[in-house]
Amino acid sequence: MSRIPSRSVRRESGVVLLFALVLLVILLLSSIALVRSSVNSTLAAGNISFKRDLQMQAGRGIQAAENEFKSGGPLASATTLDSDLASANYSSTMLPSGPNGIPTMLLDDSAWTMTGSDISDSTAPITDPVTHKTITTGVTIRYVIDRLCTNTGAVTDPSQCVIGQLGQDKGGTAWLKKAGGTPQLVYRITVRVLGPHNTQTFVQQLISE
């Protein structure tokens, strides 16, 4: 003779089933959150890696700018430095800059007035394994040089420019290298590097000439 399950047994079975469903939902949500966290971590790690690479690449821009001042370069002559030279990405006066000290012409391409060529690597397209978007593997380096002076032309008044500390004479004309010498003027090199995932970095260096 069979026994009919009591209501309490059916009620307990229903409660167990409900708890099981709730646990499954919690596990599903936890899995989704874990996958999202993993993807975000991968993207963050990738961006940090790109950023570090761009900072290293910026050294190429610094070197290219410094080469402009070397013998045979377009900025090797002291008289050349008294005037703007767009082909060498050079301004004889201090360029307008944003609050972070970056010249605005590097922040806004529409404000770019120089004619010197960018340093551009291969731009062969690849598919990003995370976002599945097509990106380029190369970087583009752009630099600008500005003399930290308020006026163009030969410098006759030290108050017009930022004067370097190295090599200054300790006598009465401290703004000169040597008695009867020329001003140790300061030049600012700013480099912008663009890379994959729309990453970018800026590097600045001051030099005295």
Image (tube, grey):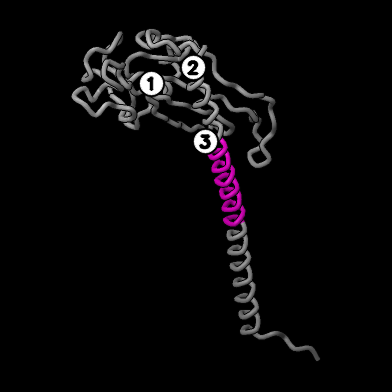
In depth, the one of 174 and 87 nearer the eye is 174
Look at discs 3 and 2 and give the one toward the viewer.
Answer: 2
59 above or below 79?
below
Residue at 21% x, 15% y is 157
Look at discs 1 and 2 and give the one toward the viewer.
Answer: 1
Q: Is residue 145 magenta?
A: no
Q: Say which residue label 1 marks.
A: 209
Instruction: Name the element at disc 2.
Output: loop
Residue span colored magenta: 32-54
Determine which of the numbered discs, if any, sits on residue 68 in the image.
2
**Picture quadrant of residue 196:** top right
In depth, the one of 166 and 93 nearer the eye is 166
Q: Position of residue 198 (x, y in %)?
A: 54, 31
Quadrant of the drawing holding the N terminus: bottom right
Q: Say which residue label 3 marks.
A: 55
Characterize the local packing of mark 1: few (<14), some (14-19) or many (20 or more) Cα atoms within 10 angstroms.
Answer: some
Residue at 66% x, 86% y is 6
**Picture quadrant of residue 10:** bottom right
In depth, the one of 169 and 33 nearer the eye is 169
